[in-house]
Structure formats: structure tokens, C-alpha cells
Amino acid sequence: MKPCVYILMFSLLLISCGQSVRHEAVVVKEKTNESEDPSGEYLYAKYTCIACHSLKGQSMYGPPLNTIYMKNVEVVRNGKKRSLVADREYLEKAIMDPDFERVQGFEQRLMPRPDIPEGDLKILVDYLVLMNASPD
Ligand code: HEC
């Protein structure tokens, strides 16, 4: 065979290999996207927590959420003042049932009751715990 035929065959082989590799890459990427959990940062924005709660220590419409994990928080429940530790359970309850008790100093401000599936709630609370551990 003439050399140019070899070159032609070789390039055809390269092209076909290239295509199959590309195809596999696409399939893998689609799979990862499907099974990937949304990030806490994404959910914090999606459920609009970001509009009322700072993660940098300032009060906005609501109290900051990066300074509370495992600290004492002062709340009012049924008109009675209480001091409790903001553990994971407290955070979940405060998110899912905001009317159950109110943070002192914020009693006149309302937090809307969000509609969050269990899986997303866990990711959100993990995110808050993480934000409490970081210095800023
Ligand atoms: C419209 C404003 C608003 C939105 C949106 C909102 N909150 Fe709140 N949140 C408040 C206010 C006001 C309080 C304080 C009054 C109370 O305790 O209900 C509060 C209280 C809290 C507390 C208790 C804080 C403490 O210091 O003990 C947590 C935790 C919390 N919110 C988490 C969230 C999360 C997570 C989201 C998003 C899913 C969210 N909030 C969305 C306004 C909001």
C-alpha cells in the first residue's frame, strides 16, 4: 500500500477513537450531575435564607446564623423566656417551625415557614454548622 493510505487509515482510527472517548465523557458527566447533592450554599440562596440572615455576624432582618451553633440563645416560647443551646435539633426546629419560639429581640419580626424536604434540611444545617466553624 502507498504511504498515504496508511496515513488515511491511521487518521480514521484516531478520529473514531476520539469520538468514542468524547461520548463516554459526556455520559459520565450526565450521571454525576444527576446524583450530585445540591450544595448548602446553593440551598441557602434557593430558600431565600440569604435575604434575612447574615453569615458574617451582622443582624439583618433576622439574627446572624454564623455565631450561634452550640452557643446559648435566648428565646421566647408562649410568652416565657428561655435560654437554650443551639444544637442541630434546635436549628432544625427553628428552620422548620419558626413560630414555635422566637429569638429575643426579634419577636416582632416574622420568619416565613419554609417548605424544605428532609434531605435539603440536613444539607442546610450541615452548611450552617460549617459556617459557624469558620472565622468570618
Ligand atoms: C423573611 C425573613 C426570613 C427568612 C427568608 C428566613 N428567616 Fe430565619 N429568621 C427570621 C427572623 C426574623 C428570625 C427571628 C425570629 C424568630 O425566631 O422567629 C429568624 C430566626 C431563625 C433562626 C434562629 C436563630 C437564632 O439566633 O436562634 C434560624 C436557625 C433561622 N432563622 C434559619 C433560617 C434559614 C435556614 C432560612 C432559610 C431556609 C431562614 N431562616 C429564612 C427571618 C427569616
Image (cartoon, helix red, strand yellow):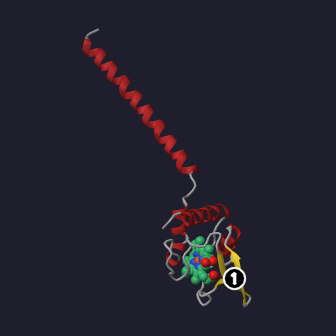
Ligand 1 shows up in which quadrant of the image? Answer: bottom right
* Residue drawn at (55%, 81%) of the image: 62
Residue 58 in the figure: left or right of residue 101: left
Residue under label 1, please give it: 101
Q: Can residue 39 be seen in this view?
A: yes
Residue 132 in the figure: left or right of residue 22: right
Give residue 74's position: percent from left, percent from top. Answer: 66, 82
Tell me if residue 105 comes above or below residue 55 in the rendering.
Answer: below
Q: Quadrant of residue 77?
A: bottom right
* Residue drawn at (28%, 15%) of the image: 5
* Residue drawn at (36%, 28%) of the image: 15
Q: Does the beta carbon of the residue at mark 1 sit less than 8 Å from ligand 1?
A: yes
Q: In which quarter of the image is residue 89?
A: bottom right
Q: In which quarter of the image is residue 81?
A: bottom right
The amino acid type, in three-letter code, at marker 1 is: Glu
* Residue drawn at (67%, 72%) of the image: 86
Tell me if residue 92 comes above or below residue 1 in the rendering.
Answer: below
Give residue 27's position: percent from left, percent from top. Answer: 50, 41
Quadrant in the picture for the N terminus: top left
Q: Element under label 1?
A: loop
Between 93 and 130, the residue placed more toward the observer is 130
Q: Residues within 10 Å of mark 1 (few under 14, many from 20)?
A: some
How many marks can you see?
A: 1
Give residue 123's position: percent from left, percent from top. Answer: 61, 61
Q: Can residue 48 be seen in this view?
A: no
Between 33 and 2, the residue placed more toward the observer is 33
Between 105 and 38, the residue placed more toward the observer is 105
Give residue 114's position: percent from left, percent from top. Answer: 62, 74
Between 107 and 45, the residue placed more toward the observer is 107
Tell me if residue 51 comes above or below residue 129 in the rendering.
Answer: below
